[in-house]
Amino acid sequence: MGDMIRVSSLTKTYGDFTAVDDVSFSCKPGRITGFLGPNGAGKTTTMRVMAGLTPATAGEVTIGGHLYRDIPNPGRHVGVLLDASAQHVGRTGREVLVLSARLMGLPLSRVDEMLELVSLSQPESKRRVRNYSLGMRQRLGLANALLGDPSVLILDEPANGLDPAGIRWMRGLLKDYADRGGTVLLSSHLLNEVELIADEMILIGRGKIVASGTKQELLDGHTTGGTHVMGTDNVSLSAALTAAGHAVSPAGGGLRVEATPLQVGQVAADKQLVLTDLRPAGGGLETLFLALTADTQRDTITSEGGTT
Ligand SMILES: Nc1ncnc2c1ncn2[C@@H]1O[C@H](COP(=O)(O)OP(=O)(O)OP(=O)(O)O)[C@@H](O)[C@H]1O
């Protein structure tokens, strides 16, 4: 299937400050796309343009081929959760949903369905949002986004404020949603949150896309070429690898080898050495994420007054 969300050469400036700089990416139905970047990278700004809350300076975002503002009754097509802490704090959770349901012309039974889906109890739904924890606000925000049974979800930091059980619950909910053909874009500044849930990842730093693809594609594109290996007899393993012409150095409880995992495994097999760990070196996605965004941390003191 084609792209559901399409961001084309999107630029957003505030005065002479460029918050989003020529950003392009797309999101497919049935997939969860993670939008990952450090604080201030431009995620929220991009999502605000998507939801028609702020105009683009240049470029555009289309959802199902349309600009958000051209979609009639948009809540029936696109569910948006932007700032969970910006909800109307004087209303009860239930009132928030009832108002949205009325606006979209939905039956009130849908409100109870959504409350149940996000595990907000009846007594909780009758409390004012002011007295909600951040996690409860996120649940309410998700209920609100899902209310109109949209085919696209745009969620800004939805895991913020959820406890580990809550994050797992949300992951299940979004996976089910995507499995039924839904398109999900969710942002986070925490790799761990996105890594487990997203099928594809878009990495943004300082308003620019720095990498994108599936987890495996990202790792494949940025491996160092070396291998991390560990065995029951690292001394013999090291000797065998050196004898086979590979440079070996100690790393963690194992060895770092300048060879491919296949080459290392072959040497071990030839010498009948038992391996307990064998993988491409490089430190995984976290190292990659930090490396890619190291010079793009807008909100750190070290990046101030740069020459970029
Ligand atoms: N209305 C505005 N006027 C001026 N600058 C703005 C405005 N909105 C956002 N910015 C700036 O644009 C940059 C990108 O902000 P944005 O909120 O999109 O980042 P983010 O990736 O969502 O970060 P976070 O993870 O902290 O939410 C920031 O430096 C921010 O200060």
Image (tube, rainbow, N blue to C red):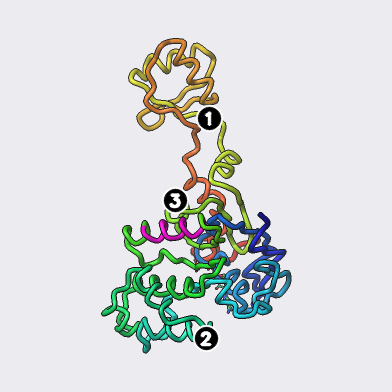
Residue with the mark numbered 3:
196
Name which residue type carries label 2. Leu
Q: Residues within 10 Å of mark 1 (few under 14, many from 20)?
A: some
List x then y, in percent, for residue 260.
54, 25
Is 7 in front, or is 123? 123
Q: Can you tell which quarter of the image residue 141 is in?
A: bottom left
Residue with the mark numbered 1:
226
Residue 98 visible in the current orientation:
yes
List x then y, in percent, for residue 38.
51, 61
Q: Residues within 10 Å of mark 2 (few under 14, many from 20)?
A: few
List x then y, in percent, for residue 233.
34, 18
Question: Residue at point 62% right, 70% down?
Answer: 19
**Mark found first going from the N terminus, 1 or 2:** 2
* Residue at disc 3, CB closer than 8 Å to ligand 1: no
Question: Residue at point 44% right, 70% down?
Answer: 142
Callout 2: SS? helix
Question: Residue at point 56% right, 55% down?
Answer: 30
List x then y, in percent, for residue 17.
64, 73
